[in-house]
Image (cartoon, rainbow, N blue to C red):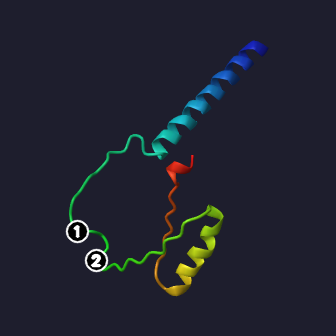
Amino acid sequence: MSDLILLLLIVFLLLCLALTVGGLLVYSGLFSDVVVKTGAPPISNATVAYKFKQGAYKDRGAAFTESCSICPKLKTIGISYDDPEQF
C-alpha cells in the first residue's frame, strides 16, 4: 500500500510540474502569433529632448532627476548604453 501511495504522489507531482511549465509557456506568449503591421505611428505629436551623460551608471540618477524636473508633466524615459570598448 505504501508503494502505491508513493507512486501516486510522484505522478501527481510530475503532473503539477508539467502543468506549471505549460502554463508558463502559454503565459510567456510562446504560442502567440506575431503580428507585424505598417501604418501611422501611435504618437501623433511628439517632442523629443535628450540629455547626454557619459560616466558610471551610479551617476545616471541625478541626470534623470534633472530631466524630469525640467518638464514634470511630460513622460520621461531613460536609455543607458554600455561602452563595448571598456571591456
Between 17 and 29, the residue placed more toward the observer is 29
Q: Position of residue 17 (x, y in %)?
A: 60, 31
**What residue type is disc 2 on?**
Ser
> Which residue is found at the position 62% from the left and 71% from the top?
61
Instruction: Say whether residue 62 is left or right of residue 25.
Output: right
Residue situated in front as seen by the camera: 5 or 58 = 58
Query: Which numbered dot is residue 44?
Result: 2
* Residue of label 1: 40
Q: Are marks 2 and 1 in contact (CB under 8 Å)?
A: yes
User: What is the secondary structure assignment of the residue under circle 1?
Assistant: loop
The residue sitting at 63% across, 22% down in the picture is 11
Mark 1 Cα shell of 10 Å, populated few (<14), some (14-19), many (≥20):
few
Label 2, secondary structure: give it: loop
Q: What residue appears at the point 48 percent right and 75 percent down from the top-left corner? A: 51
Q: Is residue 86 above or below residue 63?
A: above
The numbered dot on residue 82 is none
Residue 86, given in percent of the width and then of the height, sits at: 56, 50
Query: Would you say 52 lies left or right of 31 here?
Result: right
